[in-house]
Amino acid sequence: MMGRPSNRDERYEQVMQALVRCVARYGLEGASLAQVATEAGLTRPLVRYHLGNRSEMTLALQAYVLDSFDSQTDALVEALPKADPGTALVELLFDDTCGTSPDMVLALAALTAKASEEVELRDACRASVLNFEAAVAGALRGAYPQAGAGAVDACAHGVIALYYNVSSLRPLEMPATWSETARGLAVKLVRELEDYS
């Protein structure tokens, strides 16, 4: 007779999502096991089982957030159409209905702030951001092979800088024109690559 399936993975995901929300709301140092437990609707001992102590909690958050960003980067590149992938890239990045949650971006910002104190965390965060930039540059390079590497890399850098700016400030509920201006600038950067044909 087989036992019932474990819900460990479901509970872990529930705990991690609650941790991300708490870090987004209270910061890395302000998020406590008790707050995460309340947010997750679970007991504190169960949350501690999944997260451990504060340093283990930070490591768990780091792995979860960076793995999520890396997975989203891969999915983004895979979702790009063959026709006009540059514009599609910008539309996907700046679409409010899909993409990275503001809480996840704020959790990354909290990890980035902590990274000044911890070399391994800094290296991991940097690698994730540079992976994102390289993936965007690769997609643009494939779409605009006539553009030089410097122009493509500068475009990719500008597009992701605009994306991170808009995403990290989304909780401020900026006017729609503000994010549309950033999206328009990103499109303009991509369109400039067409001038190399």
Image (cartoon, grey):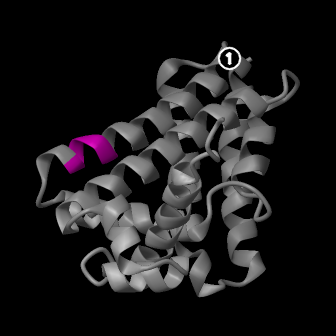
SS type, badge 1? helix
Q: Residue furthest front?
A: 1
Q: Quadrant of residue 25?
A: bottom left
* 143 relative position to 149: left or right: right
* 193 relative position to 88: left or right: left
Q: Which residue occupies the foreground of this view, 87 or 79?
A: 79
Q: Amino acid at mark 1?
A: Gly
Q: Residue furthest top?
A: 145
Name the residue located 33 percent from the left edge and 54 percent from the top edge.
Answer: 60
Name the residue located 76 percent from the left edge and 56 percent from the top edge.
Answer: 98
Name the residue located 13 percent from the left edge and 54 percent from the top edge.
Answer: 118
In the image, residue 140 sits, relative to residue 26, either above or below, namely above
* 21 relative position to 83: left or right: left
How many dots with numbers? 1
Q: Residue furthest right?
A: 83
Quadrant into which the C terminus falls: top right
* 172 relative position to 67: left or right: right
Q: Position of residue 134 (x, y in %)?
A: 48, 29
In the image, residue 84 sits, relative to residue 44, either above or below, namely above
Q: Position of residue 53 (x, y in %)?
A: 20, 66
Q: Position of residue 176 (x, y in %)?
A: 77, 78
Q: Which residues are magenta?
A: 121-125
Name the residue located 62 percent from the left edge and 20 percent from the top edge.
Answer: 141
Q: Which residue occupies the foreground of this view, 7 or 166?
A: 7
Quadrant into which the N terminus falls: top right
Observer able to see residue 165: no
Q: Which residue was labeled with disc 1?
A: 142
Q: Is residue 103 located in the magenta-colored stretch of the structure?
A: no
Observer able to see residue 69: yes
In the image, residue 101 sits, relative to residue 157, either above or below, namely below
Q: Quadrant of residue 117?
A: bottom left
Secondary structure mostly taken by the magenta-highlighted segment of the chain: helix
